[in-house]
Amino acid sequence: MKALVWHGRYNMQCDNVPDPSIIDQNDMIIKVTSTAICGSDLHLYDAYAPMMEKGDILGHEFMGEVVETGKGVTKHKIGDRVVVPFVISCGHCFYCAQKLTSFCENTNPDGDKQAMMMGHHTSGLYGYTHLLGGYSGGQAEYVRVVQADNGPTKVPDGIDDEKALFLSDIFPTGWMAALNCDIKPGDTVAVWGCGPVGQMSIQSAWLQGAGRVVAFDHVPERLEMARTLGKAEVFNFMETDVYDELQKITNGRGPDSVIDAVGAEAHGLGSVDAVVDRAKAAAGLATDRPHVWRDMIKCVRPGGNVSVPGVYFGYADKIPVGSIVGKGLTVRSGQTHVQKYMDELMALVAEGKFDPSFIITHRLKLEDGPEAYKTFKEKKDGCIKVVMNP
């Protein structure tokens, strides 16, 4: 089969690789009908995330048709259309029983390596490094889905791929990011980053009762999408002071909640702290660039909420802990517990209350993937979200 394979920094290739097979009775094989490139895939493309290996198949946003099932699979049958959460859940451990599936105790075979860095390990993820299981991802013609009864969800008739695909990751991620803000009716929510997760966070904030949504970016196409389709008030952080603007529009109080939809590779263009972050990361003195953290903590009102769906990997410098404590802020973060929200969000889509497909700007073939990674990375051609149809 064909798959997008990582060969090193900025080197993605569409290779012929062996077809996946059933290894465990709880596995199934799906023929991928739609798969996407996620913003967090760029951390792998950049070789920023640790423990990538040449030959890894990427992709954690995918869906398709079941073509083979193991003897232990009872929830799905051949021919079903399913969307697959990027988080792998066993369904019965301490965390899965509480629907905290991204903390699953049994699906990360590389957990010992991760625990050495973090103190504990979390769940396995598809297509995302050998700290998180080394599972082959879904940017391929076929994929082995593990723990098939504990995550993949059947797509109802009448819902096409483009409406269902993003329940694999970015829609639930934006939804949980907004939930972590504990939004009260009329609240002001500010979002840093108008990429795919930022766009879904904006939409989710409205759906959860926000009275005002403000968004920051510097890419014109992203700002325009957030303004027109997201109905947010948008500002180019290269042209305005983020703190001054937020204080102005909130009468000096600050937003009730802030969301970091940027993550570990924040550019912070034009800011001195971001230049220092890049230098420290290059010198191995830090792993992540937390410019957005500093910005958000400064801007949010006392007693406010800081929500971090953006991906981080290790150590960051100069986080203003004194401000977090002094302002009494609540900070919530974490990989998304996709399974927890799947049914609720599928119902929103099925009932026509939300259509996530608005995010798609590029529809391509799997063979176009290597160039698509480059286009997405360089933010060229108005690229916000790439979907490929193997």
Image: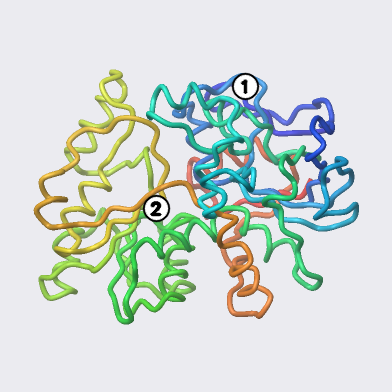
Residue 142 in sight:
yes
Image coloring type: rainbow
Name the quadrant of the C terminus.
top right
Q: Is residue 31 left or right of residue 13?
A: right
Q: Quick one: SS at disc 2?
A: loop
Q: Residue at horizontal 62%, vertical 45%?
A: 89
| Mark count | 2
Q: Look at discs 1 and 2 and give the one toward the viewer.
A: 2
Q: Residues within 10 Å of mark 2 (few under 14, many from 20)?
A: many
Give the Cα separation between the discs numbered 1 and 2: 27 Å
Q: Quick one: SS at disc 1?
A: loop
Give, as a three-letter code, the residue at label 2: Ala
Q: Is residue 190 above or below residue 69?
A: below
Q: Is residue 368 above or below residue 98?
A: above
Residue 313 x, y percent position in the rendering: 40, 33
Residue 222 x, y percent position in the rendering: 44, 59
Q: Residue at horizontal 33%, vertical 42%?
A: 266
Give, as a three-letter code, the residue at label 1: His
Tell me where residue 232 sits by quadrant: bottom left
Q: Residues within 10 Å of mark 1 (few under 14, many from 20)?
A: some
Q: Residue at horizontal 62%, vertical 59%?
A: 167
Mark 1 vs mark 2: which is more N-terminal? 1
Residue 55 x, y percent position in the rendering: 67, 22
Q: Is residue 385 left or right of residue 240?
A: right
The residue that mark 2 highlights is 261
Q: Is residue 260 left or right of residue 69?
A: left
Which dot marks residue 7? Answer: 1
Q: Is residue 347 above or below residue 84?
A: below
Q: Residue at horizontal 54%, vertical 37%?
A: 105
Marks 1/2 in contact by CB < 8 Å: the verdict is no
Residue 384 in sight:
no
